[in-house]
Image (cartoon, grey):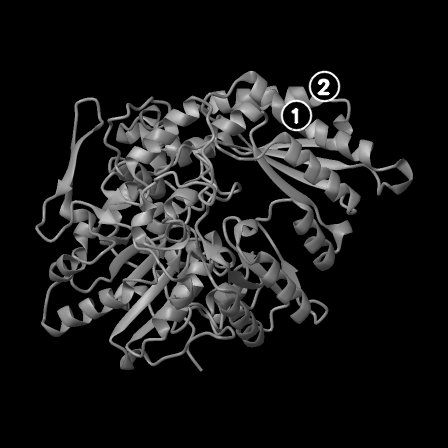
Amino acid sequence: MKKLALSDEILLSIDKPARYIGGEINEVVKDPKHVDIRFAMCFPDVYEIGMSHLGMQILYSMFNSRDDVYCERVFSPWTDLDKVMREKDIPLFSLESQDPIKKFDFLGITIQYEMCYTNILQVLDLSHIPLHAADRGEEDPIVIGGGPCTYNPEPLADFFDMFYIGEGETVYDRLFDCYKENKKQGGSRKDFLEKAAELPGIYVPSFYETVYHEDGTIQSFSPVNSHAKPTVTKELVVSMDDAPYIEKPLVPFIKVTQDRVVLEIMRGCIRGCRFCQAGCVYRPLRERSLDKLKEYAYKMLKSTGHEEISLSSLSSSDYTDLEGIVNFLIEEFHGKGVNISLPSLRIDAFSLDVMSKIQDVKKSSLTFAPEAGSQRLRDVINKGLTEEVILKGAAEAFHGGWNRVKLYFMLGLPTETVEDMEGIALLSEKVAETYYDEIPKEERHGRVQVVASSSFFVPKPFTPFQWARMCTKEEFLERAAIVKQKFKEMKNYKSLKYNWHEADLTVLEGVLARGDRKVGAVIETAYKNGALYDSWSESFRNEIWMDAFERCGVSIDFYTTRTRSLDEIFPWDFIDAGVSKDFLKREWLEASAERVTPNCRQKCSACGARKFGGGVCFENKN
């Protein structure tokens, strides 16, 4: 039996000790002495969040399919264990072998959201790895970052040896082979970084230099090492059927956020919502075949014993053979103790029919995401959803037995007016009215419940709104107050509920999403002063961050409220994400003119993703 890194005394003194012991079903066990590469795969958040992440499970399975690589897992210790590890000087360890992370060849960190940045520094710090890449020696692991936030890696540039831009299934084998070859030849850490920098999708930040104008904007960003590429093109899986996937997912000992088998049906999206980074950077849309999905469904349910299977994608309703996969799952598994979950569906007759078959409708609520309160603003953001469609879907849902609806909106969108804000309350009221108009009194299951939630808008890199200014904290709260007041005026106020996201957290997210290398000092200062688990409202302390900005002399408004010119160089412009800057500019201008762009299956909008030669772009090439 393996020796645990934490004593029984410590494990009994902390919350959820099963987070730290490993040994779960389908865990991979290898002898570290018999592999060439040890890779610590890190999700910089608590175990329950990290174990719910599909990408991490895919790469864990893929890496361990190689005899010469041992991939193990590590998560951020919760605050109780963090305190103990510092007091007793216990180095951070992997779940599988319980060995210190410092012993590994690679520390791979998936960066899914901006508010985990201080947790990344926690992982490095507790692992006794120097925070700055420039301070690491030959014995330290190579620290590599991947995931959606690497589409602007610059705020984290000082802390990583390299970033992998794009989808992880394509280049890692070559990177590992390159590492082994360099080791065999007695090459140094820098030798390896230079070889890696020549691989597609790999970005080594220390090989680049930023020159600034006097006003703080970027004058130039260019390589200072001959091995580095001027442009780093994202990596993309062209054929989903040929890409590695999971047959034996890890099964956690404790309940995690997504406690189910996940079947990824496709990547990408055809919709083109102008606020959505994922919809841009994951283009083009690529589907898995029905036969492959059936095969994986059988294998994963058998190997895990899970009682739920979920379809994963940005917009499941756009999957070509949705009816086929849904009918297969219902026929094969429903009624055999397996529940079926279908997120990301548009609410139409087919979706409601399916949900009626697979859910206890009295216990669930339906979700619509209009994003904006008025049709004008929905056209600005290219949402492609009309009030008529929303109300028709709500009516069908109410007739189907639902009486709870969630509506998701954003506040602070470009061109937003008071009328648009008040439209959130008016649309919510219309949904409630639809229930009372459509359902006779004797058939109602109590009062309808309409819960409207608004997040605050952050203009993300590689979206048409990357040029937009962002609201201040005060402006966000003023807008939420306008919406709240309008809700109070509604006739069906008792059937309505309104809530909103934290404004100060959103402002910080905006800085981290759009920042350059100067923001790295703020992240480090905030971390050293106690910032940790910033995505958890009970841990987030805004005053620590405000103090860090002041100490580092970094302006929040420079990254958030400042209007950008169309010819400004962005920190992320060296990355080719498939969508061209020209396309994003055109869409920004179309948004200003309140014009809608058709989705990718209706008409090609020449976004640039066709060059990858797959998915919808390939199908519609004629």
Q: Is residue 192 left or right of residue 614?
A: left
Which residue is outermost to the top? 418
> The residue under label 2 is which amino acid type?
Glu
Q: Secondary structure at mark 2?
A: loop
Which residue is outermost to the front? 622
Residue at (66, 27) in percent of width and height: 427
Do we see residue 210 in this rendering? no
Residue 18 place in picture, x, y as percent: 52, 66
Residue 19 place in picture, x, y as percent: 50, 63
Residue that badge 2 annotates: 489
Residue nearer the viewer, 436 or 158: 436
Verify CB contact (< 8 Å) between mark 1 and mark 2: yes
Residue 473 place in picture, x, y as percent: 46, 25
> The residue under label 1 is which amino acid type?
Ala
Residue 386 place in picture, x, y as percent: 60, 32
In three-dimensional space, the C-alpha distance between marks 1 and 2, rounded to whole angstroms, equals 9 Å
Q: Secondary structure at mark 1?
A: helix
Residue that badge 1 annotates: 425
